[in-house]
Structures are given as structure tokens and as C-alpha cells.
Image (cartoon, grey):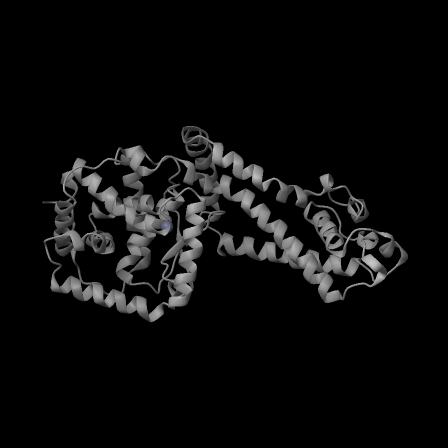
Amino acid sequence: MPGGGGGALGATTPLVRRPGVWLLALLPAHALVLALAPAPTVEAVYGQALFPIVARVHAALDATPISPGVTLGVALLLLVLGGALRTTRSTAPASSAWSASPAPTWSAAATASIGSMAGGSTAGGSTAGVQGGASPSRARRFLRASAWRLLVVAAALAHAFSPSWGLNYRRPSVGERLGLVEAGGSFGRTADRVVRATNAARVPWGRPDLAGLERAVDEAVQRTLRELGLAEAAVPGRRVRLLPPRLMAVGGWAGVTLPWTTEAMVDPAIDPRSLPHCMAHEKAHQAGFAREADANFIAWLSLVRSDDPRLRYSTLFFVVDLFVDDAQVPLEPDLVADAREAVAIQKAVQVPAVRSASERVYDTYLRANEVQAGIADYDGVARLIHAWLQRHPETLPE
Ligand SMILES: [Zn+2]
């Protein structure tokens, strides 16, 4: 509450009156609620009712000239550093009040920080405690205050993750929603079909017109989601921002959708043939398809049926690698040359150590969000394509 006076949240403030402590203490309860929430309820309440509203709010933020994610990140950083600085200034060096308090310095900095983050003033931290009368250096007090604030901000972001987007992991998968879980038939025949279609779809790829491609991609994704009855959170015209080149490609990643703003971003340093597929993949994430296999499948189905030959080739070129080992049909020489060029582009920007470290982190993140396959979930698109083609063979010619 503004103007409440920092002294009210001094070192003697009970823990129950510290919002930062509550944010941290409630994390296990938050995780428990997520673990127990039945998927049909999440789908009905969150997927069909709440997330579509959230997605429209996020879509309104797309128009801002500066990325909402960057704005949020800078604001949180200023909150942490500015608050820590105020706390450091307000915790004056040793006095009788300081030595009289039993609370450790860490708690003092934390308490003042919490007061500020809760809307209160941090100016009243002069009663904060330091044991023994020997005050720590200003730099140490600043670091401790910053560390506490970072912890509280991380807890706040963790709580915000689920309502802003993360609950989409708890919804039924695309395979379950479209009846693509059980797939009979020969995977080898599907592989032959995909390789033949990719050979036929190959188009020379010059310098891409990214704005034109994005418009075409958006129309294709929106049309597909409507046709499938999955468009509850799809907002036409959401933009895909370009990251500074190599920022994500250095770790082998093509793009990202930020969970707190659902803004989509792609790295222009990746092989340009993959850009339309990656844009469509991120747009599927924006529409609430959190799992990687699902986003890849929505991207594939949207682009493979497009009238634009660049979109068809982009998505088939992206997925063909998952089928070529099971196919009897070989890739055409031009396509092999494209694949070699794509690998060369990838190798030129990737740093293997960054790639393996970031893959481990993302694998852990996916498993923590109920994606059992972890990072291998990306390749689950092959199973979905196979199942789809069993039911809709007209999508690709024999
Ligand atoms: Zn993704």
C-alpha cells in the first residue's frame, strides 16, 4: 500500500505480513494445484474461457514498438536494482537499534525489499537488524537486497507463468483433440509419401520477403485452426518479431514464444527455408498449443495445404528429415543440396557447448511441464503426420 511507511515492514514485521514470503511459500501449493487439476477441467475453464481472453490482451500488446517482453524485463530489473539501492541507503550503519535486533542482515534487506514490492515505502528500514553491531559493507548489503528481490521476482514470474500461458501444457494434446493418438498403417508408406511430396514441392529459395511470408503464414494458420475447430485463442494478425541475428541460433534454436506475453520471435540467422515453418510454429504456441509436437503439427498442416509454394516447401523441408530414413524413395539431388546448405548455415552460427547446455535446460523445463518426451517432443510431429495421413490421405498425393 503506497505511503505505508517502511517502518511498518521493519525487521520485526511478522512473516505473514510479508508478500514476498507469501509468494515463495505458495509455490509448492501452486505446483500441487497444477498437478491435481484434471485436464478436462483445465480445458473447459482455462483453455476455452480464460486463455482466449488472455491471448487477446497479449495481442493488443503486440503493437507496441518495443517488445513487451523487453519492457517487462527492463522494468523488473529496475525494480530489483532500484529497490535494492534504496534499501542499501536506508539501512544506515551500526546503531543501537541495529545491534538490538535479532534479525540477520539478509532478513533486513529482504524485509525492506518486500515493503517496496508490495507498494510500501522502503525508506523506513533503519530499524533493520545487523547482528553484533559490525555492519556489512554497502556492496554486500546491496547484493543481499538484490538477491532477495530477484528471488521474489522469480517467484512472481513463476506464479504468473500458469495463467498467462503455462496451463496450456495441462490441456489435452492436439492428438487427443483430433483423434490422432492411435495410428495404424505403414509408417514406411507415409515416409515415402512425405519424401515424394517434398521432392515435388522444392522451389529455389532466394532472399525471402519476410513480411509477405509472415502474412501468408498467418492466414494459413488461422484458416487451419478455424477448420479444425481449434481457434478459440487464435487472434489473426499477431506479429512475429525478429530477434537480433544469432541470439537463439547460437544454441540451435529457431525462435521462442515468451510465456508471459505470448509474443513470438524468430532468429533470422537460421536457414531461411525454415523461417515460414518456424513462424507458423510460434503462432501455434501463441494460440495455446504449448507442446512442441503440437505446434509443429499445426505448422505443418497449415503450410502443407497452402497455395503458396514457399510455405509448402518450407514445412515439408523442415519435417522430411524425420521420414527419410524410413522411406524407400530418395531425396532429389536439389533437395539434398538444400539440406547440405541448411546444415552449413546451422553449423556456422551454432556453438555446440551453448547448444547442449540450452537443450538440457529446455528438456528439464518440458519434463517439468508434463511433456514426458522432453526435448524429443519436437519429433513427435512425425507420429501426428502419420496418423493424420491415415485419416486424410488427400492432404498429400500418393
Ligand atoms: Zn516451440
Quadrant placement of the C terminus = top left
x and y, in percent, of residue 214 in the image: 32, 53
Asked whether 61 or 362 is in front, the reply is 362
Residue 25 located left or right of residue 112: left
Q: Position of residue 250 (x, y in %)?
A: 39, 65
Please state the horizontal and vertical placement of residue 111, each as a whole percent of the image. 74, 49
Position of 195 with respect to 163 (left or right) is left
Question: Measuring 27% from the left and 40% from the top, which residue is drawn there?
Answer: 224
Image quarter in which the N terminus is found: top right
In this orientation, which residue lies closer to the viewer: 314 or 391?
Answer: 391
Q: Give the residue at x 63% y 49%.
A: 152
Most foreground residue, 331 or 198: 331
Mark yes or no: residue 310 visible: no
Specify whether 212 is left or right of 4. left
Question: Can you tell which quarter of the image residue 88 is in?
Answer: bottom right
**Residue situated in front as seen by the camera: 136 or 398:** 136
In this rendering, would 319 be left or right of 161?
A: left
Give above or below for 332 relative to 49. below
Q: Is residue 337 visible?
A: yes
- Residue that sits furthest to the front in the current view: 132
Within the image, what quadrant is residue 174 found in? top left
| Residue lying farthest to the bottom in this orientation | 348
Residue situated furthest right in the rendering: 96
* Residue at 19%, 53% in the rendered image: 309
